[in-house]
Image: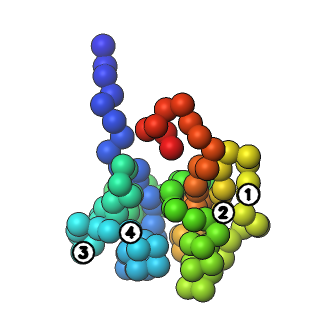
Amino acid sequence: MIVVERTDFVSVPVQDMERARRFYGETLGIHSPNPEAAWPEFETGNVSLYLVDPTAIGAEFAPHTSHIALRVADVAAVREELEAAGVEFDGEIMDTGVCHMAFFKDPDGNALMLHRRYAPTTNASSS
C-alpha cells in the first residue's frame, strides 16, 4: 500500500523568474532559503511554493487557476498593504461565515488568495 506522508511543495509556473522572485520574496514577504536558485522555493510554514519555468522542461506555460490560499493574521490589513504595493484584487473581501478571503493573482496570472479562518474548528491542525 502506498502511504503519502505529506505535501512538500506546490509548483508555481512562472514566465519571468526575476519578476516572480521579487513578487514572492519582496511584495509578499515569503522567505526563501535559496532565492537565487534556478527554481527557488518560498516557504509558507507548511508547504513551499516552488517557482518553475515550465518551458525549461519542455512544457507550455499556463497559470494556476485554482487559488493557493495564503494564511495571514488579518486579511483586510494585508490586502491594504498589498494594494499599496500595487497588487490588484478581484472583488471585495469575502466572508463565508467561517473565514475571510481576498482573491488576487501574481504577475504571471497564478490565482492566489489571502485567507484567515476565524470560526473555531474541532481539529486544531486545520485552523
- x, y percentage for residue 89? 68, 71
Tag 1: amino acid: Met
Q: Spot the residue most to the right.
A: 91
Please name the residue shown 56% across and 72% down the image: 78
Identify the secondary structure beneath mark 1: strand
Residue that badge 4 annotates: 30
Q: Foreground residue, 7 or 64?
A: 7
Of badges 3 and 4, nearer the viewer stands: 4
Separation of marks 1 and 2 at Cα, in angstroms: 6 Å
Q: Residue at x 31, y 19 (%)?
A: 2
**Gap between marks 3 and 4, in whole Å?**
14 Å
- 10 Å neighbourhood of mark 2: few (<14), some, or many (≥20)? many
Query: Which residue bears the numbered disc 2?
Result: 102
Of labels 2 and 3, earlier in sequence is 3
Q: Earlier in the sequence, mark 4 or mark 2?
A: 4
Where's residue 49, x and y in %?
39, 57
**Circles 1, 2 touching at the beta carbon (< 8 Å):** yes
Tags 2 and 3 touching, CB below 8 Å: no
Type of residue at label 4?
A: Ile
Type of residue at label 2?
Ala
> Which scheme is used to colour this image of the protein?
rainbow
Dividing the picture into quarters, in which one does residue 56 lie?
Answer: bottom left
- Residue pointed to by mark 3: 36
Answer with mark 3 or mark 4, whichever residue precedes in sequence. Answer: 4
Q: CA distance from mark 4 to mark 2?
A: 18 Å
